[in-house]
Amino acid sequence: MYKRLGILGGMGSFATYNFYKSIIESTPAKSDQEQIDMVILNASYIPDRTAAILHGGESPLPCLLNALKSLENTGCDLIAIPCNTSHYFFDEMQNSCKAKLLNMIDLTGEKLESLGVAKTYLMATEGTIKAQIYEKYLSRRNIDIMPASDEEIAEMMKVIYEVKAGKTPSTSRVYDIAGKYHNLGCEKIILGCTELSTVIKKDKIFIDAMEVLKDTILELFCIFPQKFKAF
């Protein structure tokens, strides 16, 4: 039984806000005291993950480790990181942290496997896609990811960085891409970026990694008796 949840946020801040809001709205609490005890660190100073992974930018790992230590020092024994691309550094983070870290990508793979999904398409940052972060976990479950073209990745990145900038992006092209790959046999389209999670309306063709992370948190704090809430 975990006592205090830590959220390592700020990657980006709008996604962190929506993640926290989603947890609160999904918690069947009748009083303040029934809400989950949590600490949110909006660590917006962490360097850009895609720039570091693909383009030789400053590594975010030292800042990630410092932020995790800050959450540990506040008594957090379970930590969620609502940023898919940062999971490139997951092993190093967990090895340096005494608290349990939730692996959003592995949890999404577990959910896909439970649904019997064999083929997917990933909507995410260029860093997440080109570093094959999802492939590392989904291949263990015999789940294939159809490759995205550079043009499609550019469309996703445009939406992602407009959300980070506080803008309301046009998502019509993203929906077109999702529909295309669903028609090509992808049973689920993964929303593998928390910025996309904030602007794409969920329907049956999508699986939202941030939603999976939220449901796992609620289950671990004994709110839901089953492994995952149906969605």
Image (cartoon, rainbow, N blue to C red):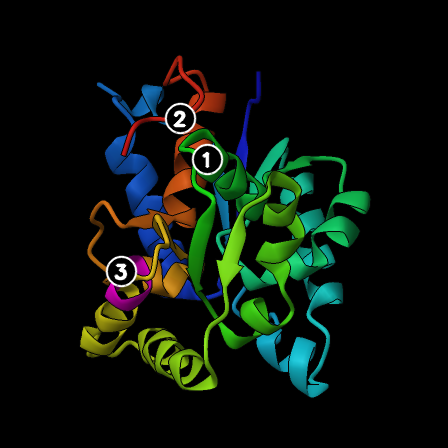
Q: Is residue 129 left or right of residue 221?
A: right
Residue 144 picture location, percent across and down:
53, 53
Sequence-wise, the earlier of marks 2 and 3 is 3
Q: Quadrant of the N terminus?
A: top right
Can you identify the residue that label 1 sits on?
111
Inspect the image, locate mark 3, and give the three-letter code of the amino acid beneath it.
Asn
Look at the picture and state if 197 lies above or below 57.
above
Whether residue 168 is visible, yes or no, is: no
Q: Is residue 31 left or right of residue 208?
A: left
Which mark is drawn over residue 183? 3
Residue 59 vs residue 56, the one in the foreground: 56
Mark 2 nearby-residue class (10 Å; few <14, some 14–19, many ≥20): some
At numbered mark 1, what does the secondary structure look like: helix, strand or loop? helix
Q: Where does residue 50 sit, x and y in percent of width and height?
A: 59, 76
- Identified by mark 2, the residue type is Phe
User: Which residue matches tag 2?
Assistant: 228
Would you say the residues marked 1 and 2 are in contact, meaning their CB atoms lie under 8 Å apart?
Answer: yes
Main SS, magenta region, reads: helix
Q: Nearer the viewer, residue 43 or 54?
A: 54
Q: Amino acid at mark 1?
A: Lys
